[in-house]
Image (cartoon, rainbow, N blue to C red):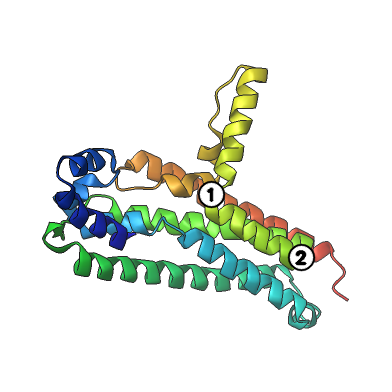
Amino acid sequence: MVAVIAGIGKLIPLLGEDGEGILFLFPYADWFSQVSIFTVILTVTSYLSLMILCMISSNFINEEQANGYFKNIAGQVKDKSMLILSKFFTVFVISLAVLVCYVAGSALASVILMGNSLTFDYPDGFAFAMCTRFVLYLAVNAIIIFLCTLTKSKSLAIVFGLVFGTGVTRFDYSILVTFLGMVLKTDIYIASFTPDGQVFSISAESTNGDLVKAFAVGVCYIVAFLLFSSLILKKRDNK
């Protein structure tokens, strides 16, 4: 993404008046004059990182269940909820690794490609915004852990990863909101109460109130879906 923006920035001066029109329509046009590296990091980490994370997590969880290792361990553990917590801990590490790679990659690309327009001004709320995004990533993966535990299907696990990671559900939420508005005469923005709906709204312009709400949504989903996964595992015959 940084390479594309930098390339457009170099191309626009060569287009003369036509380039000014493109610049007016470009969503990150202000980056060509001045932009903080932290703003770039916060923006770039929202692109495809959740999809990659969901795919890795769903594949890991499903392979662990398919190769028999999970079944053998489950028979030796008294409290099977610990198995779900171990999965979540692994997903935590995977999530952190993916996010760190994105942060490092976007920072390096910014320094190399953005040139003189790049600053190191630290925007208010950057750390909280990144922490909130991380919590929302964990919440989405808690849902994936639940769905993988429930279905034990590798193909469905991949589908879940793609659906949540690409943000397709946001369109479903929009359709549902429209339907509820027509039937119940109410206006409830469902995406604001789901982690996959909230995660794509985190940006450098997010207010503290928005971040607190998103953080709370993430924590609630993590607790709820880890509990659901534990209940399913406890009732299932692992023989």
Q: Nearer the viewer, residue 69 or 30?
A: 30
Give the quadrant of residue 70: bottom right
Amino acid at dot 1: Gly
Q: Position of residue 199 (x, y in %)?
A: 47, 49
Badge 1 density bin: few <14, some 14–19, many ≥20, Cα 10 Å: some
Which callout, 2 or 1, points at the residue further toward the start of the chain? 2
Residue drawn where x is 42% and y is 44% of the image: 201
Residue 184, percent from left and from top: 65, 19
Which mark is on residue 176?
none
Q: Secondary structure at mark 2?
A: loop
Specify the quadrant of the image occupied by residue 75: bottom right
Classify the position of the C terminus by image quarter: bottom right
- Name, please, the residue furthest toward the top: 185
Q: In screen coordinates, is 122 left or right of 145?
A: left
- Image quarter where the N terminus lies is bottom left
Give percent across and percent down for residue 167.
53, 49
- Secondary structure under tag 1 reads loop
Q: Circle 2 is placed at which residue position? A: 153
Residue at point 71% right, 58% down? 147
Provide residue 200's location: percent of width, then percent of height.
Answer: 45, 48
Q: Is residue 31 above or below residue 82?
A: above
Label 1: which residue? Answer: 167
Classify 23 as above or below 239. Answer: above
Residues 164 and 184: in front is: 164
Q: Residue at x 29, y 60 (%)?
A: 2
Left or right: where does residue 36 sit relative to residue 103? Answer: left
Q: State how many labels appear.
A: 2
Query: Where is 176 relative to 95, above or below?
Result: above
Residue lying at the far left in this picture: please name it. Answer: 116
Q: Amino acid at mark 2?
A: Ser
